Image: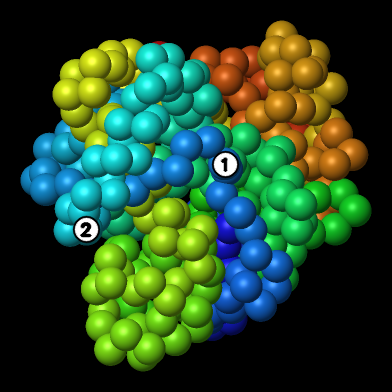
Amino acid sequence: MLLLSVPALACLLPGCASSPGDGAADVDYYGPRTVSAREYGYVRPAADVQVVGRGTRHTYAGRNSNDLWERIRRGPGLRIRHHAKVERAARAMARNPQYLTDLNRRARPYLHMIVDELERAGLPTALALLPEVESRYNPRAVSPVAASGMWQFMPYTGREMGLTQNSAYDARNDPLAATRGAIAYLRQLHDEMGGDWALALASYNCGPGCVRRAMRRHGSRDFWKLSALPAETENYVPKLMAVLELVESPERYGLRMPELPNRPALELVHANSSISLSEVSRLSGVSLSQLKSLNPGYKLGRTPAAGPHRVLVPAGSGHKVRKGLVKAGKLSRSDLADTRRRRSNS
C-alpha cells in the first residue's frame, strides 16, 4: 500500500528518476513527494498471519550465492531493533508447515528481478519480501479501496510515482514498473524518516504524516513506542520482520526453506512499436495465458501505442521473440544491437 509524495518520483529505478510508465532504464533481464495512504485510501496488507519483527545484521556477500534466498540473507540489513512481537508473529506463521514452500512458489517469478532492482538502488535486500506482506507477490492483486498490483499502489499514489494508468495500461500491475516505483518511494521515505527503516516502512503503510503525528504525540522516534499508530501499521512492520525471520532462520522454527536458483526467471524483450501478447506467444512458444499472467499491466493484450513496448517472458524464450521481431522490423534498437553483438561473438 503505497502512498506517494509528489517530488521524488521522477526516478523510478534505483531510487531515481525515470517513470516506470516510460519504461526508462530497462535492464537486460527483466533485464518524492509524500502522500499518505490514509489520505487517499488506506490499503490493507495481505491478511494472513499477524506478525512482528527484527532486522538483519549481515555484511553483503551474497550476490554470487547459488541460492537467491541466501543472497537476500546476506544482503544489507534493515537494522530494525528486535522486539518480542517479532518472535510471537514468526511462531504464529510457523504453525503452517508449508509457509516457506508456499512463499517460495509465490515469489519465484519475480524475486530475482526485485532483488536486482534493490541492489541497483543500494537498498536492503530484505525489502524484496515486502510484496509478500502487500499482495503475496500477486501483480493482479486489487484491494477493496482500489490499491492495485504487487506493491499495492493507490491510483493517486501511482500517478504521483509516474505509474501510467489509462484504458490500455496500468503500470501499477506491471511488475517491473511497479517495483521501480516502490523502490523510489521507499528510498524517499527512508530519507524523510532520517534513515530509520522501521519508520519508513510504517510510513509506507499509513503515510509519513500519520507517523510524524504519532512521533510528536509520544515524543519518540522509536517505532516500537508509537502506540498512537493505527493497529494495522503497528502489525505491518512486525509482519515483514517475521517473514524475514523465517527466511533467515527456518530451522529455528522447525521449517525448511526450499532453495531458489539465483538466476533470472524472467527476461525483457523490447519492441520498437506496439506488439500483441498473442504475437509474442506465437514467436516464443510461450502460452498466451502465461504471457498475460506475467504482463497484467497491458489491459488490451498488447503494449499501448504510447509505450512502453516491452514484454516480460520466461527466461530463455526471449531470443525466439527477438528473432521474430527482427524479421518483422519491430525489434527495438537496443535489443537489435544486442542481438547483432551476440551473433558476432558466436
Q: Nearer the viewer, mark 1 or mark 2?
A: 1
With 125 as the anchor, is 292 left or right in this view?
A: right
Structural distance between the alpha carbons of marks 1 and 2: 22 Å
Q: Provide residue 75's location: percent of width, then percent of height.
A: 20, 43
User: Picture quarter containing residue 161?
Assistant: bottom right
Q: Is residue 192 above or below residue 243?
A: below
Q: Which mark is residue 333?
A: none
Q: Residue at x 70, y 55 (%)?
A: 147
Q: Which mark is residue 80?
A: 2
Report crowding for label 2: few under 14, some 14 to 19, many 20 or more residues within 10 A (C-alpha).
Answer: many
Among the two numbered marks 1 and 2 on one chain, the one whose residue lies closer to the N terminus: 1
Q: Which residue is mark 1?
A: 47
Q: Is residue 215 above or below residue 235?
A: below
Q: Residue at x 41, y 81 (%)?
A: 214
Residue toward you, 268 or 73: 73
- The secondary element bearing badge 2 is classed as loop
With 302 as the anchor, is 324 left or right in this view?
A: left
With 52 as the anchor, is 18 left or right in this view?
A: right
Residue toward you, 125 or 312: 125
* The N terminus sits in image quarter: bottom right
Q: Is residue 186 above or below residue 210?
A: above
Q: Provide residue 303's location: percent of width, then percent of height.
A: 79, 42
* The C terminus sits in image quarter: top left
Q: Is residue 112 visible?
A: yes
Q: Residue at x 23, y 23 (%)?
A: 253
Q: Residue at x 85, y 58 (%)?
A: 166
Q: Amino acid at mark 1?
A: Ala
Q: Amino acid at mark 2?
A: Ile
